[in-house]
Amino acid sequence: MRKLLFFVAIFAFTLIFSQCSVNRQITQAKALGDCKFHITSADSVYLSGIDVRKLKNLEDLNPMKYPQLATGFMTKSIPISARLNIDITNPTNKTAAIDQLEYKILLAEQELFNGFVNQRIEVAPGGASRVPVKLNANAYKLMTDDKTRDAFTDLVRNMSGSNNSKSSKLTIKIKPTLALGNKKVDYPGYITIDQEVTSKMFLGQ
């Protein structure tokens, strides 16, 4: 009888602990939704393996000078990669945290990048944290589509630190993922951030 009571007590404790863990995750994810997200800088920006920070003018990116670009246009594969640094500020009196999140970044209403951050993000009440987000995509369509070509050109100019560029409007959509036992459950809806970004901002100035 004692063994039975012992196992019942252990089961009840585990159930309560599991429920508390779920409630804590939900509370922390909701607090994350109340945080302020701000793109602060970008680095390691490469287009077809070319470091755009080393270019004096974006016009220097021509297929005659960089054969990998010519190949990219022929194969419709022009990889772009970068690391975007995002500051998260928590104005609430609760800890904001998540163990995993999905993100999408849109330019001119077209999806530019998407991916996952598989690490714990935690922001103390009234505190701030910086999260680096790696971006990888095929820029071919962005460079050849009339709807996105000019916006993408301005974005690359801003990432390169050019002073002669228009600000770029980026939309960031973030979807936290909750760990419920052995299952992953997506947070309902996206946290959406619209931001005008400039070359000075990408340089962290």
Image (spheres, grey):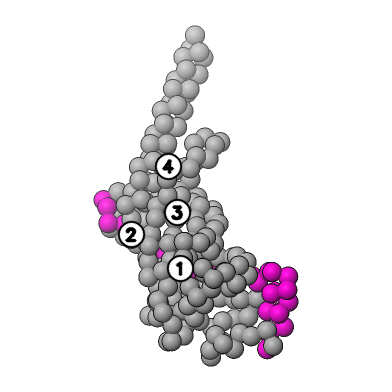
Where does label 1 land, which residue? 85
* Residue 82 at x, y percent in the picture: 55, 71
Residue type marked 2: Lys
User: How far apart in space, not on screen, are marks 2 and 4 (Cα)?
Assistant: 18 Å
Label 4 close to label 3 by CB (< 8 Å): no
Q: Which mark is residue 174?
A: 3
Callout 2: 10 Å neighbours few (<14), some, many (20+)? few
Residue type marked 1: Asn
User: How far apart in space, not on screen, are marks 2 and 1 (Cα)?
Assistant: 14 Å
Where does label 2 land, which residue? 36
* Residue 184 at x, y percent in the picture: 53, 40
Residue type marked 3: Ile
Label 1 close to label 4 by CB (< 8 Å): no
Q: Which of the two discs, 1 and 4, sits closer to the camera?
A: 4
Callout 3: 10 Å neighbours few (<14), some, many (20+)? many
Segment tinted magenta in the rendering: 65-93
Residue type marked 4: Pro
Label 2 close to label 4 by CB (< 8 Å): no
Report whether 55 appears left or right of 201. Answer: right
- Between residue 56 and residue 13, name the one nearer to us: 56
- Between residue 195 and residue 40, name the one nearer to us: 195
